[in-house]
Amino acid sequence: MTKDTFYIPRLAIVGVGLIGGSLALALREAGAVGEVIGIGRGLANLEKALELGIVDRITQDAVAGTREADLVFLATPVCKLGEVAAAIIPHLKRGAVITDGGSVKAQVIAAIEPLLRPGVSFVPGHPIAGTEKSGAEAAFATLYHHRRCILTPTQNTESDALEMVERMWRTAGSEVVVMDAEKHDRILAAISHLPHMVAYSLVNAVGSYDRYEENILEYSAGGFRDFTRIASSDPSMWRDIALTNRAALLEMMERFEHFLAELKEDVRSGEGERLYEFFQRSKELRDNIL
Amino acid sequence: MTKDTFYIPRLAIVGVGLIGGSLALALREAGAVGEVIGIGRGLANLEKALELGIVDRITQDAVAGTREADLVFLATPVCKLGEVAAAIIPHLKRGAVITDGGSVKAQVIAAIEPLLRPGVSFVPGHPIAGTEKSGAEAAFATLYHHRRCILTPTQNTESDALEMVERMWRTAGSEVVVMDAEKHDRILAAISHLPHMVAYSLVNAVGSYDRYEENILEYSAGGFRDFTRIASSDPSMWRDIALTNRAALLEMMERFEHFLAELKEDVRSGEGERLYEFFQRSKELRDNIL
Ligand SMILES: NC(=O)c1ccc[n+]([C@@H]2O[C@H](COP(=O)([O-])OP(=O)(O)OC[C@H]3O[C@@H](n4cnc5c(N)ncnc54)[C@H](OP(=O)(O)O)[C@@H]3O)[C@@H](O)[C@H]2O)c1
Ligand SMILES: NC(=O)c1ccc[n+]([C@@H]2O[C@H](COP(=O)([O-])OP(=O)(O)OC[C@H]3O[C@@H](n4cnc5c(N)ncnc54)[C@H](OP(=O)(O)O)[C@@H]3O)[C@@H](O)[C@H]2O)c1
């Protein structure tokens, strides 16, 4: 093991779902972990994780499972992160580093930082990767390959701990980007949280249209299916995100409403040229991210 | 050739793009056509169509190209359908059948039916299939396989002509559904036209967010890309649809706005349970169409 190789003797994953499980698999595949302990509430999911080789050992006791860990990855739903941190922090060993994968950062920092004590560091993070599936079964080793992972250190974050977590994500295949939590929350509100709200609203609006007896969704072709795939995401995860990134999300929802209202007015008044320009501008923006 | 086999001695395709070109390819592959004549404005696209074996002969003269046709498929942008029909109908041979693939039906019927004369029939249609690509190069023979094609005959539509067009679409691999034009326009407004308006608005709202120097779309992962793929669709096609299905589209845009506003209020007031229910209902509706 050279000095440059990233290696964690004991890694604890609290919440062995898509995000936690995939990190464990990625680090294992890279030979970058000794023992991996999986912590969760439900036994069935933990046993699945064990069976799939995601973790070496499982426990429903978060304190026991993290006590000896060098690195603790919190990957529970966002609203549970503070609770879990409060339970485990008093019992972590000296030098332990906690990091998380929560989709919202300012609120998670506000919940966890006040709980810290000397010798325990916290590095807030969020891998920009995911699918609409959840649970240990959804995890796979390459989820983070060629994805970005955003870390949002605060003035309290120790640089050694930050460096360790950066190296961890690079080892898992990601490009690490560091920014402040507020910026993270606004960018994610725009590119992820707003689209989910829009997709959920769209499916509800269309799926409950009952003017005709048949289910009109049966007429939908590939476009609608792709467009609404994200509306299959876990409702409790999105409830948590909507509750914890409220300000940025409301700002973006209003921004979107404004654009949609402008478009509606052009439809109403039959403004062909303006409609063309609106669609053309959008197509250009979209084609640029292909 | 048994009596039951569908066969068109001479087929004219006006607008050899994704929709027109794919029908030609599908019927050719089924051995269901004699000669296929491709009609368009731009020579480059027509030559491409010839080169790709989509058509046997090309012309920029719609009258000359359709004069001897048994079946004429109009697959130009929606707003051009009436114009093309007006030009060719006086010169079609007795017994000729016209059908179209326009995404909007009531307005197309209003434009074409008054132009008909004895011996020339019109069967309004719309294949529910497509991609975000256009032009002859985008055409492929299996586009219509296992897709629905909606036909919207009126009281003036001859039953023989309707039957012929039904058989044509079945031969191309589609399931034919017959309904009235108004119902078609509302269903399509819901499952296709509204989602496109939403996607275009979303990409514009997010892509023009310039609070930060970098292009925030670069942070978008797979979800955003899939979600917004339909915003890459042809702007002029969507301008035409927005102009010609205005009433149904406005109704659906308002319906959607209502659902989004409801969701926004729940975000604003932090209504966790209501948010969960909203997302859960949407997930159920969405998972049902998987
Ligand atoms: N999915 C995505 O696309 C995505 C992307 C980036 C970040 N994230 C974030 O990553 C985190 C996890 O998301 P995920 O998609 O991996 O969800 P997931 O697949 O549902 O996994 C979450 C896991 O946490 C466990 N858990 C829940 N409450 C717990 C508690 N109090 N103590 C211990 N374990 C608990 C769950 O198991 P039990 O219920 O059995 O305990 C479950 O296995 C969330 O914060 C989310 O915001 C998600
Ligand atoms: N794309 C979809 O997803 C989809 C699905 C179902 C139905 N539709 C409908 O199908 C029709 C065609 O759409 P598409 O996607 O196939 O578009 P496309 O690929 O752009 O093809 C349209 C073709 O029409 C030609 N054209 C335009 N104006 C013309 C005119 N005045 N006379 C003769 N040819 C003309 C164009 O070539 P030139 O410009 O060189 O003339 C082009 O090749 C539209 O009415 C659309 O609403 C589309």
Image: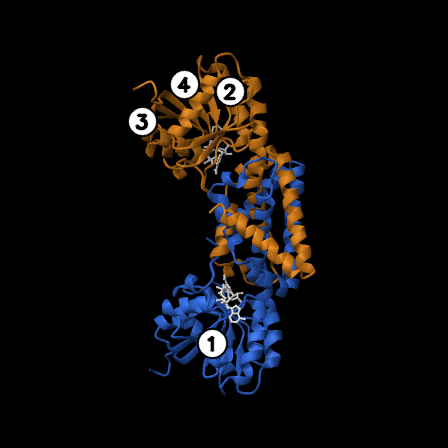
Chain colours: A orange, B blue
In terms of secondary structure, where does tag 1 sit? helix
Q: Which mark is residue A83?
A: none
Residue A18 percent coordinates (x, y): 43, 36
Letter of the chain that mark 4 sits on in the rendering: A
Tags 4 and 2 touching, CB below 8 Å: no
In the rendered image of this protein, does residue B113 appear above or below residue B276? below
Question: Pointer 1: what residue?
Answer: B165
- Cα separation, mark 2 vs mark 3, equals 30 Å
Q: Tell which of A215 and A259 is nearer to you.
A: A259
Q: Is mark 3 within 8 Å of ligand 1?
A: no
> Label 2 amino acid?
Ala
Q: CA distance from mark 4 to mark 2?
A: 17 Å
Residue at image position (49%, 70%) is B15
> What residue appears at the point 52 percent right and 41 percent down from the top-left corner?
B217
- Count of picture labels: 4
Q: Is residue A42 visible?
A: no
Residue that numbered label 2 is attached to: A87
Q: Nearer the viewer, residue A19 or B130?
A: B130
Dot 3: element? loop
Residue identifier under label 4:
A70
Are discs 4 and 3 located on one and the same chain? yes
Query: To which residue does mark 3 refer?
Result: A31
Mark 2 or mark 3, earlier in chain: 3
Q: Quadrant of residue A22?
A: top left
Q: Nearer the viewer, mark 2 or mark 3?
A: 3
